Every structure is written in C-alpha cells, then in structure tokens.
Image (cartoon, rainbow, N blue to C red):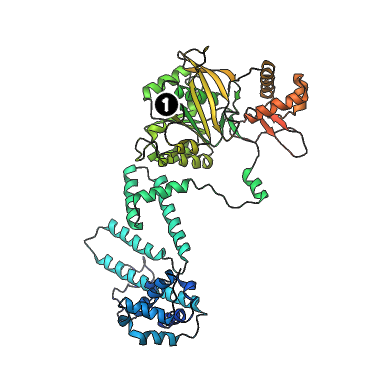
Amino acid sequence: MTQGIYPFPQEQPSFEPNINELPPFEIEAEEEIIGGILKDPNAINRVKDTLRPEHFYIRAHKDIYQACLRLSKKGEGTDLLSVTSWLKNHDILTRIGGRAKLASVVGASVTAINIDHMAKLVIDAAIRRDVIKVSEEIRKLGHSTDIDISEMIYLLSNKVKSIIDTPSYQTKEESQRLIHDRLLNELTEIYTTCEQPTLRLLKLKDLAEESQLSMKLLELLYLKSLTEQCSNLLTYEELKELAGSTVREWLMNGLVPKNTTILLAADGGIGKTKFAYGIGKVLIQGSEFGQFNTTGQKRKILYYQGDESPGDMFEALEILGYSEEDISKYVRVRFGWSGENIPTLLHDLKEFQPELVFIDSLSTANRYSVYKESEMEYARPILELTGLASQYKTTFVIIHHTNKEGGVRGTTAIRNAVSEVWQLTKDTSQTATPNDRILEINKSRSRSSGKKYRLMFNPEDLGFTFLGEEVEQPNGAGQSAKESTLELLADNRNIGFTSEEIAHRLGASKSYARRYLAELAADGLVSVNRQPGKPNTYYLVYEDHPRITPRITP
C-alpha cells in the first residue's frame, strides 16, 4: 500500500486471544443476593422475574438460587432451613459445599434492601460473559474455511442477535413482549415483502427453528395480530381528531363506501362478475346507477381476476363498453393472484393507486390455503385487506359464492371480516322474469342494512338496469319525493340544503321532508352535515379529481 492512498498508519488487528483475562463476574453481589433471599422471605419476589439461574457465575450460587425459585413457585418459604432441606432431598447439598456454604452466604449478607441493584450487577456481568463467548465463536467461525460465506453471514447474524435480544434485567412480561414484538415484525416483513411463496415458506421455517416455535403457531400469531383492533384510550378531542369529518365518504352514495371491504356473494350463473364490471365502468364514467350517485369520475379500478380467462374477461369488457372514450386508461388487470401474493398487491397499490379493487374470487384467491373454507383461518387474506383499505385509501370488493341456504359460504369469519355484504340473487316473485335480480345490502357499517333493490340483467349487453327499491307497501308519493330530492341535490352538487329549503322547493311539508331526508341519509343516498345548534344540511358530493374536500354552504 502506498503512502498516497493511506496517509495514516494502518493498525493491524491482533489475532491472539488474551488467555490471562478473567471473565466478568460479581461474586460478592451473588452472595448478597443468595444471603438476602435466605434471610428475607419477600426478597425472592423482587428478582425472580428478571434474575435467572444462568446469570450466576458460581455454580453453587446457581444451584441455590434455582432451589429458591422452585420453592417460591410452590408457595413455600425460602428460609435457610427450607432451602437446606430441598437441596439435601435432591442430592445437591454436597455439590454446593454443604451446610457450610449456605452459612457463609448468609453471613456475607447484611440485608436484602439492595437486592435489585445486586441483581442488575449480576445480569450485566452475565451479558458481558455472553459477549465474550459469542466473540470467541465468531473468531472460530472466521477460521472455518469449509463454511460458505453466505452461511457464515447467516450464522454471524444469529449469534449477534442472540446478544442484542437478551432480555437483560427486564421482567418476564417485558421479555415476552420483546420476543412478541420481534416475531411480529419479522412475520409482517415476511408476509408483506416476500413475493415468492416458496421463499416465504423457507423464511418461515428458518424463523420457526430460530424461535423454537412451530410454523403453524407463527401463522396463528400473525393471523391474531390482524384482528387486533383495540385502540389506545382516547379523550373526546383525540376521538374528534382521529375521526376527521363526521360525514361518511363514498365512491358511490349508498352503495360503495370509501376505504373499506365489501363481500359480493351470489350463486353461480347470477352474473356477479358482470355486475362488478358494470359498477367499475359507472365509477370511471362518474355517472349514476339508479338511486346510487357517484361522487366523482375517472376512478382507478384494479381487477384481480381468477375465475375468468383473459379472453372471456376482455370480451365482457368490450361488450360493456370499456373501449369507449378513455375508460381503459383507468383500468388495470392481473390474473392468477392469490392470498399468498400480498407483496404483489402492495406493489400494485403503491404503483397504480386504485380507488377500487375487485378480487374475483375468494375461492381462487385462497386456492393455495392450507385451511378449509369452514375454518376461521381461511379468512386471513380478508383481514389483511381490511388493514390495507385504510392504509392505502382504497375499497376492496371480494366476490364469493353463497351456500345452499342462500347465505355466505364457508366460515362465519368471512362475513365478520368485511364491513359490507352485498347479496345478489334471482328474483323469485311470481311476476319476475328469469333475468330479474335482487341486490340486498345484507350487512353494512356505513348505512342501513336489509334494504333490497330490484335489478334486471341483460344477457345481450351484459349490463344491469336499476328498477328501484323493493318495498312491502309501495308509497308512490314518498318514492317520488325521494327521487325529486336526489335530482335536486344531483343538480346542485356540493351545496347543502336544509329540510325546510327542500320542502319549499318540492312543495312538501317540513315534517314530511325531514322524515324522508332522514331515510335517505340512513341509506347513504345523501350526505348530511350536522352542526350543534344549526339545522342539518343535505347534499351530494362530487369531487374534482384528484380528491378535494367538498364545500358545503351554510
């Protein structure tokens, strides 16, 4: 090496071990701890969650402390007589130096008042000994020419991690929390960043071996973490800040909420996939579907298709008019996706930033699942989507099948995991045609549930026509007033009207207007702005793209 390249003398590393240095230890502190426990019946409770037998340097101290822990766990005393008897009964008394050794540690201890500090000294010394031990193992590893470099780096990482993750003087609960958090971080990284399922399986196997847990338990741990929905205790002001606007946001009023998960369930041959394509087109065009008004246009739609071939899907989209204008610009399609490919979904969410994702279907997305459709764990991908909906500001529509009874097929965890459930069925009334359908809002956290809407499927153009709400006792005047109100608000987007103003414009009574406006708001068909001390204002949002906050007039 030249002086020009390295202007300073280079210190050469020493490869000679220092055999004259003793390892770190705290013998006096160990004696203080043992003596304090033998004298004070409560002393063991102050250190038993943090101080472990392996922290002691002297073997006799380790054995005595282990005896104290065993007695304490059984609810027995840790006095000199009890510990001596336990050691004798287990043939350990002679090994530790007999009664003389016990008498000496009792004599070395004055009080147990500083036992916490003594325990910290002993644990610190133990960790330093572990560092020396691992350093020596790493030195030998460096000399092992028969080990591949990549394997050496892996072993090196594990040895260093064993020191970094040492719980030191944490309580047992704190130690478990550290292990819990580390495992969840590693599991989340594996499940959300590793795109190859086979490589993911290998990583899970390595983590299982390293943590001495089964792969099934690790997967269950990750699944349980997805269902943890409990927040911190909030003040009212914190709740207000967290909630933001009190107005529910929609992609399509009354039907498609923003940032949520929807299950579209139907029997085979009903047309659920074509219904999904139709909703996607309406959202891109910014038009309406019967009573359901869109809140903007040019929404980006992502289709994950597993039930149709590329040819069948393209043909259906062409018939539905996806080649018209610039609709195709706002559509992306991926085939063959499964719930094992969450990293691929994350990539698409970041890259394309869709506002609506259709997954057709849950069965094909879960085709590689080791769980049966009747098992709770089968719903894991939906739980993952629920978190992603909020994180990436998108809505997921998962297409699924119904069972023989007409309900959602499979475990109840599927239905429980989503916020909205749509059920599309054939209209079985006497006057219905073979193409008549019923769309039921079976479950909703955004609007009233149980409402049914009549649709008609056209096999020629694959479109669905909205025929109206199905009601037991038709009220022509009431339905007409609702439709007139929706037309008024649609013509005056982002402008709020009070019930009195709407009643005046439509020539209805104030009480009647308030009643049916409350029904429209409950169904999510209109938005309502509520302010204390002021009358409610009703309106329909229409966003310029990109999203903006609507201006509501007082």
Q: Is residue 23 visible?
A: no
Q: Position of residue 266 (x, y in %)?
A: 45, 25
Tell me the SS state at disc 1: loop
Q: Nearer the viewer, residue 478 or 344?
A: 478
What's the amino acid at mark 1?
A: Lys
Q: Nearer the viewer, residue 423 or 68?
A: 68
Q: Is residue 431 left or right of residue 185?
A: right
The quadrant holding residue 393 is top right
Quadrant, the N terminus: bottom left
The quadrant holding residue 499 is top right
Q: Nearer the viewer, residue 309 or 537?
A: 537
Q: Is residue 307 left or right of residue 280?
A: left
Is residue 402 placed above or below 468 in the rendered structure? below
Tag count: 1
Quadrant, the C terminus: top right
Q: Position of residue 397 (x, y in %)?
A: 49, 32
Q: Is residue 62 visible?
A: yes
Q: Position of residue 192 (x, y in %)?
A: 42, 45
Q: Which residue is mark 1?
A: 404
Kindly give the residue lying farthest to the left in the view shown.
Answer: 146
Q: Position of residue 378 (x, y in %)?
A: 40, 39
Q: Residues within 10 Å of mark 1 (few under 14, many from 20)?
A: few
Q: Is residue 227 left or right of residue 145?
A: right
Residue under the image location 43 percent in, 52 percent down? 184
